[in-house]
Image (cartoon, grey):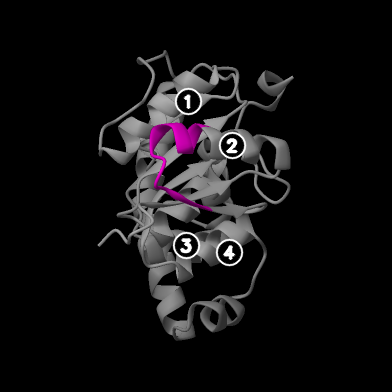
Amino acid sequence: MTGPTGPTVMIADDHPLFREALKLALMRADSSARAIEAASLADALNIAASEPDLKLVLLDLCMSDSQGFAGLAQLHAERPDTPILVVTGVEQPDAPQRARQFGAVGFIRKAQDLGAISAAISRALAGESAVEPEAPDDPELQAAAARIASLTPMQLKVLLGVLSGKLNKQIAFELSIAEATVKAHMTAILRKLNVLNRTQAALAMRALELDMPALI
């Protein structure tokens, strides 16, 4: 239940001034809201794991320890029932649709005025979608994104651990599961991604990446 201070909203952005702007937009959307700030993806994941009453996440796609859609996918895996509204400077035309595939309920660009951002926050708090109209996408990339989105939260955590170079025993320790369970998850992951090995899985994960020149 929402406490007396209203909904708890996490603002995850590594720019302090923009976090302040988002807090102002949040207060316009709901003056009773309580904002929790995260300056990195690591902070955001810690908050997501420890804050039971989190009602909404405002997430930038590009932070010091997160680029592309991997942070969104990880947060959605950690809190699949908590709405995530992406608020980002990314200008890539297909970014809103790809964000939705990885769990976002909404997408708004930082170039929008404060009123538009506040309105998007209001819609997200009300349980409504706030994603831009469809844009053309690479069919292969779209299919890869759909396959990645089909992974369970634990499978995604295992895969991200593997792709970061961690050994099975390290992943097992971090996730508090048996090493054999990590191997079983990896078998299921390869099957879902329709690939034969970890190298091919890494190539499939390019669907999590952003077209970096579009950020310039």
Q: Of the residues tagged 2 and 1, which is closer to the observer?
A: 1
Residue 45 position in % (x across, y down): 54, 61
- Where the N terminus falls, by quadrant? bottom left
**Label 3 vs 4, first from the N-terminus:** 3
Disc number at residue 209? 2
Residues at badges 1 and 3 in contact (C-beta under 8 Å)? no
Neighbour tally class for label 3: few under 14, some 14-19, many 20 plus, Cα within 10 Å? some
Disc number at residue 162? 4
On screen, residue 178 above or below 32: below
**Which span of residues is magenta-colored?**
25-35
Neighbour tally class for label 4: few under 14, some 14-19, many 20 plus, Cα within 10 Å? some
Q: Of the residues tagged 4 and 1, which is closer to the observer?
A: 1
Neighbour tally class for label 2: few under 14, some 14-19, many 20 plus, Cα within 10 Å? few
Residue type pointed to by label 2 = Glu
Residue at image position (44%, 28%) is 118
Structural distance between the alpha carbons of marks 3 and 4: 22 Å
Query: In the picture, residue 100 is in which quadrant?
Result: top left
On screen, residue 71 above or below 142: below
**Label 2 vs 1, first from the N-terminus:** 1
Magenta region includes residue 30 = yes
Structural distance between the alpha carbons of marks 4 and 2: 17 Å
- Kindly identify which residue carries mark 3: 48
